[in-house]
Image (tube, rainbow, N blue to C red):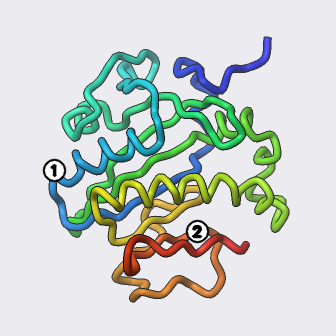
Amino acid sequence: MAADASDLHDDALWLGGAYELAMELGERDDTRLDAALAALWAAAGVAGCQGGTDGGESWVDAPCTVAGLQRFGRLAGLVTLPRRRTVVCGARAVRQASGTDWLVFFIPVGALDLAEPRSAAFPFRGGDSLLWRRPLDRWLAGIGAQVHARVPLRLALVGPEVAGLTTARSLGGQPPAERWAAYLMPAAGGLEYHQADR
């Protein structure tokens, strides 16, 4: 029987890292984080909201709130990717010692490998990975833009393990010339998208 990329209980799906939409929200604020999480779940069309117990071995219904994130560490559900494959997904908060909140939406690499077989060798295949990454990046960027419309973001990054890669302050309003990740930066009327080029 083929593995199912939408089986929350399949531990293998959660291994190997994650492909992320990491959103820098601003200074620590539970109300803003709650609003961003609700906007994220709606924008991505996530079905269900589960929290892992016993080290992630079992899943229970969980509130899609800061309280849920604090209790479980991450929340999970199911999402349909642009190529119409349903996969497990998750969200976690990163609350930095500096006081900055990040909200990270992610597709575990184990699930992504099943849904998008071309991703299996990433990041080792070089530039041809852009063939499958760009549609996924644009989809995640669209989710980020919808979140930004409800909860303004300082910055959003899209790619493998991008949470904490940089900050809006470090960038000074300009994306890097060479980009291993996609950047969404505030601009007049929304977010400006700078696609990955490596």
Q: In the image, is residue 73 above or below residue 167?
A: above
Q: In the image, is residue 90 above or below residue 12?
A: below
Residue 177 appears in which quarter of the rendering?
bottom right
Instruction: Kindly state the secondary structure of the residue where label 2 is placed.
Output: strand
Identify the residue at horizontal 52%, vertical 83% (top origin).
Answer: 175
Residue lying at the far top of the rendered structure: 1
Return the residue at label 2.
Answer: 182
Identify the residue at horizontal 19%, vertical 66% (top origin).
Answer: 27
The quarter of the rendered structure image containing the C terminus is bottom right
The quarter of the rendered structure image containing the N terminus is top right
Q: CA distance from mark 1 to mark 2?
A: 27 Å
Identify the residue at horizontal 76%, vertical 53% (top origin).
Answer: 132
Query: In the rendered structure, which disc, 1 or 2, sits on the residue that comes first in sequence?
Result: 1
Residue 90, percent from left and from top: 46, 38
* Residue type beneath disc 2: Ala
Identify the residue at horizontal 44%, vertical 65% (top origin).
Answer: 156
Residue 130, percent from left and from top: 76, 62
Estimate how packed mark 2 is, as few (under 14), some (14 to 19) or many (20 or more) residues with alpha carbons within 10 Å: many
Compare residues 186 and 157 and report the one nearer the observer: 186
Compare residues 45 and 26 and report the one nearer the observer: 45
What number is the disc on residue 3? none
Return the residue at label 1.
Answer: 30
Estimate how packed mark 1 is, as few (under 14), some (14 to 19) or many (20 or more) residues with alpha carbons within 10 Å: few
Q: Answer left or right for 69 relative to 6.
A: left
Residue 80, percent from left and from top: 59, 34
Instruction: Kindly state the secondary structure of the residue where label 1 is placed.
Output: helix
* Residue type beneath disc 1: Asp
